[in-house]
Image (cartoon, rainbow, N blue to C red):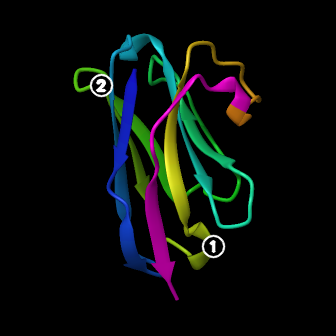
Amino acid sequence: VQLQAFGGGLVQTGGSLRLSCAASGLTFSSLSMGWFRQAPGKEREHVATISWSRFSTYYADSVKGRFTISRDNAKNTVYLLMNSLKPEDTAVYYCASRSFLRVGNYAPSQYDYWGQGTLVTVSS
């Protein structure tokens, strides 16, 4: 199983980035997918999750209205479109998969496989 996240970079406050996560070695279309982030000195936190069916999405309060998670099951890829970026969004962003989605529980321990992370830096 391999999850490869990419698309991070340096952006100014108010800018946008789109992260991608390509999956292989698993039945992507049957898994829920999530994005997490971890800033220096902080714990890894949930950003967004999308169900296997694409019908349900869940966001952290801090990113609601600014970030959009989506997926393309034909390409085994999940995306995170980030708009109106703020300096506090600076972190390493990780994608992760989970086989069973329990709404309301987005703890990292609930996710089975993880990508290597991609750094997003938002300058003020």
Instruction: Give the total of numbered labels.
Output: 2
**Does the magenta run of residues contain 52?**
no
What amino acid does circle 1 point to? Glu
Sequence-first disc among 2 and 1: 2
Q: Determine which of the numbered discs, if any, sits on residue 53 in the image.
A: none
x and y percentages locating residue 30 in the rendered image: 44, 11
Residue ID at (47%, 73%)? 121
Above or below residue 28? Residue 65 is below
Q: Residue at x 32, y 56 (%)?
A: 7
Asked if residue 66 is positioned above or below residue 59 in the image, the reply reads below
Q: Residue drawn at (47%, 18%), measured in percent from left and top?
A: 52
Q: Is residue 83 visible?
A: no
> Residue 115: within the magenta?
yes
Question: In the image, is residue 106 above or below residue 1?
Answer: below
Disc 1 on helix, strand or loop? helix
**Residue under circle 2?**
76
Kindly identify the amino acid type of the residue bearing the numbered disc 2. Asn
Task: Tell whether 32 sits left or right of 11.
Answer: right
Q: Position of residue 43 (x, y in %)?
A: 74, 54
Crowding at dot 2, Cα within 10 Å, few <14 / some 14-19 / many 20+, comes out as some
Relative to residue 108, is residue 53 depicted above or below? Answer: above
Q: Quarter of the image for the N terminus: give it.
A: top left
Q: Kindly indicate whether the residue at mark 1 contacts the one at mark 2 (C-beta within 8 angstroms).
A: no
- Distance from disc 2 to disc 1, alpha carbons, whole Å, reads 29 Å
x and y percent of residue 23 in the render? 34, 27
* Residue projecting furthest to the left: 75
Residue that numbered label 1 is attached to = 88
Q: Magenta residues?
A: 109-124
Give the x, y percent position of residue 70.
Answer: 40, 37
Closer to the camera in the image, 7 or 62: 7
